[in-house]
Image: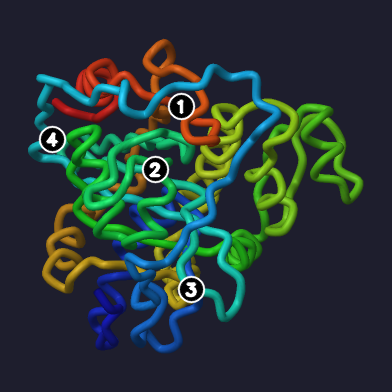
Amino acid sequence: MGTKKKSKLFVAIIALILVAVTVAAGLFVADRISEYSDNAEENTTSSETQITVTTEPESLLPEVDPDSITWDSDYSGNSDGLINFLFIGQDRRENEGRQRSDAMILCSLNPETKELSMISFLRDLYVQIPGYEDNRLNAAYAYGGFSLLKESLRKNFDVIVDGCIEVDFENFKSIVDTIGGIEVELTAAEAEIVGSGVKEGVCHLDGSQTLTYARIRKIDSDFVRTKRQRNVLSAILGKVKAMDVTGRLGFVSAVLPMISTDMTDEQLMSLAMQLAGALDKLEVTTHCVPAEGAYKSATVRGMAVLIPDIEKNRKMIFEEYLPIN
């Protein structure tokens, strides 16, 4: 792909888009792109690269033969009129190449109704990855970047992704600090993990504390973990909506070098036209895949995974989650 150097005029257009969508989604994204030069997504992982499989031998989950898993579904969805962006967060350290995606959130905008659906796809979903052995969904990004992750979502869930935006965790902390932190309601268990003197109840969190909160995983489940991420998105959206136009553009000018995308200039221009004025009136709903009752927890090849019922999840996505008229 390759992130292109933009003219000053075009940077302003991107800024409007990022305010309306990227900031609204608030997701965790990529290596700093110095003056919009080629970067993160060019750090490809070859087909020969070995991706380490995280095993959980202590798991009491039933072992499932991968050859017994069926992927058939007659259900085909229609997302005409929607703009679908995939926001990717990953724990990449400095000088490292692309890693597995830690967070994957589909943001689906209906420009006509000004509705935005945020759908978390859990990283432990066991899915088909085109050209590779079936694996967890988060392996698709490590294997083939934006394009393979988009292909995997379409193959399994019939979701068409128009473009991707990525942020790493260090830049995420900076983004939260840029808006002066956020207000989040914490449980006693969450407050203990966040630390730094925060207590149960509504707390003000800085970037580092917000990242810790969004990544908590030991006290409950990945389902609750993604709910915390959506709490963060809502808090960021609230602060951005409260800004005037000058404040929003100033914020975006600071955020822009921290993100990476595979969207073309033409796509961004089209989005700018459709997203104009959407932010102030945006109505947001949040969901996650797999849907309740539409998956099975199991162990496959030593991996603790969530095996989705493809038919049920496709129906839930297109009939309940997406903001289709």
User: How far from the left and from the top, in percent, is residue 219?
Assistant: 74, 29
What residue is at 23 percent from the left and 52 percent from the top? 131
Separation of residues labelled 1 and 3 (CA atoms): 27 Å
**Mark 1 lies on residue:** 306
Q: Earlier in the sequence, mark 1 or mark 2?
A: 2
| Closer to the eye: label 3 or 4 | 3
What distance separates the C-alpha of mark 4 from that of mark 2? 22 Å
Circle on res. 97:
3
Q: Dot 3: within a 10 Å radius of its alpha carbon, few (fewer than 14), some, or many (20 or more) residues? A: some
Marks 3 and 4 close (CB-CB < 8 Å) = no
Residue visible at 26% across and 45% down in the picture: 152
- Which of discs 4 and 2 lies nearer the camera? The answer is 2
| Quarter of the C terminus within the rendering | top left
Q: CA distance from mark 3 to mark 4?
A: 33 Å
Name which residue type carries label 4.
Ser
Residue that numbered label 2 is attached to: 137
* Nearer-the-camera pick, 104 or 83: 104
In the picture shown, does residue 129 fall above or below 121? Answer: below
Judging depth in this view, the residue of 77 and 275 nearest the camera is 77
For residue 57, side relative to residue 166 (left or right):
right
Q: Nearer the viewer, residue 247 or 60?
A: 60
Q: How many marks on residues? A: 4
Mark 1 residue type: Leu
On screen, residue 46 versus residue 110, left or right, reads right
Residue tagged by mark 4?
A: 79
Measured Cα–Cα span from mark 1 to mark 4: 25 Å
